[in-house]
Amino acid sequence: MQGTFYVIGVGPGDPGLMTLNAVRTLEKCDVWFAPSAFRHGESMALNIAGGEVDSTGKTILTHHFPMKQVHRGQRPEEEVGQAWREAADTILGYLQSGKDVAFPTLGDPAIYSTGFYVCETLEKIGQPFNVKIIPGVSAIGASSAVTETPLCLGDEKLVVIPATFEDCEIEKVLQVSDTVVFMKVHKVMAQLVKLLDGLDLLENAVLVERCSLGDEKIWPDIRQAVGKEIHYFSTIIVRQKKLR
């Protein structure tokens, strides 16, 4: 019997934010295949999963996925595509041997998750496989909670966007949305602050760095983060109308 590939959202960082479904699925899977953002580095998703679930006796694999931009509808860089193919080949081997494979991913799999790229690559191989997606707490939701900032109320419009988009595109989004959540902000803080200042939205923005982790930091004045070494796991929430 063929195994099942489980893409599991393990939340933003605190193992206590993993869902019961995520925990139970990790417990029953013999193989954990965890993504790593850095070559020869640790896997944040694996650390979260291991903080709540005993991994004794399980086959633990980590795989490096390059942190490079992916534009939908365009061929990814060769290094990125190769990482997806290598991961899919390894996972498919375990599935065909009857093993269930857990792929822990940060936050929620539906939001900028490598897990879906691996699923697409598995589909391209052409071999049938079983897959189940286990949702998780997103960094977006966790940042909203810790800053007591609602993402949307009533008929408000919410947009989630990578901060690495071109400035003109970001400005358009800010002009037509009630709330904008920026992901991947760590390398473009200066540009974002300049753009938000020009739109008179700086006072309506809050930055959350390493949400739910022990060294979590909230920047109510995001200007103070310019020039600082901001962690990759950072999110900015901007509301057109400040509540208080």
Image (spheres, grey):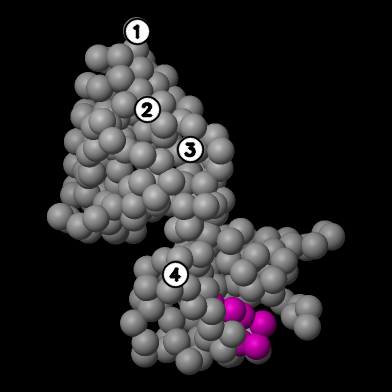
Say left or right for 35 vs 4: left
Over which residues does the magenta segment extend? 202-207
Q: Amino acid at mark 1?
A: Met
Q: Is any atom of residue 98 visible in this view?
A: yes
Say which of 205 and 60 sits in front: 60
Instruction: Of the two numbered discs 3 and 4 on the same chain, state the one appearing first in sequence.
Output: 3
Say left or right for 192 vs 92: right
Binning the other alpha carbons within 10 Å of mark 3 as few (below 14), some (14 to 19) or many (20 upward) gives some
> On screen, 112 above or below 179?
above
Instruction: Of the two numbered discs 2 and 4 on the same chain, state the one appearing first in sequence.
Output: 2
Q: Amino acid at mark 3?
A: Val
Q: CA distance from mark 2 to mark 4?
A: 28 Å
Tell me the mark number nearer the camera, choosing from 1 and 4.
4
- Asked whether 212 falls inside the magenta stretch, the response is no
Say which of 96 and 112 sits in front: 96
Instruction: Of the two numbered discs 1 and 3 on the same chain, state the one appearing first in sequence.
Output: 1
What residue do we see at 21% from left, 28% from top?
89
Q: Which residue is mark 1?
A: 1
Q: Secondary structure at mark 2?
A: loop
- Asked whether 206 falls inside the magenta stretch, the response is yes
Q: Amino acid at mark 2?
A: Cys
Say which of 226 and 71 sits in front: 226
What residue do we see at 78% from left, 83% from top?
244
Q: CA distance from mark 3 to mark 4?
A: 21 Å
Disc number at residue 23? 3
Binning the other alpha carbons within 10 Å of mark 1 as few (below 14), some (14 to 19) or many (20 upward) gives few
Instruction: Of the two numbered discs 3 and 2 on the same chain, state the one appearing first in sequence.
Output: 3
Q: Which residue is mark 4?
A: 214
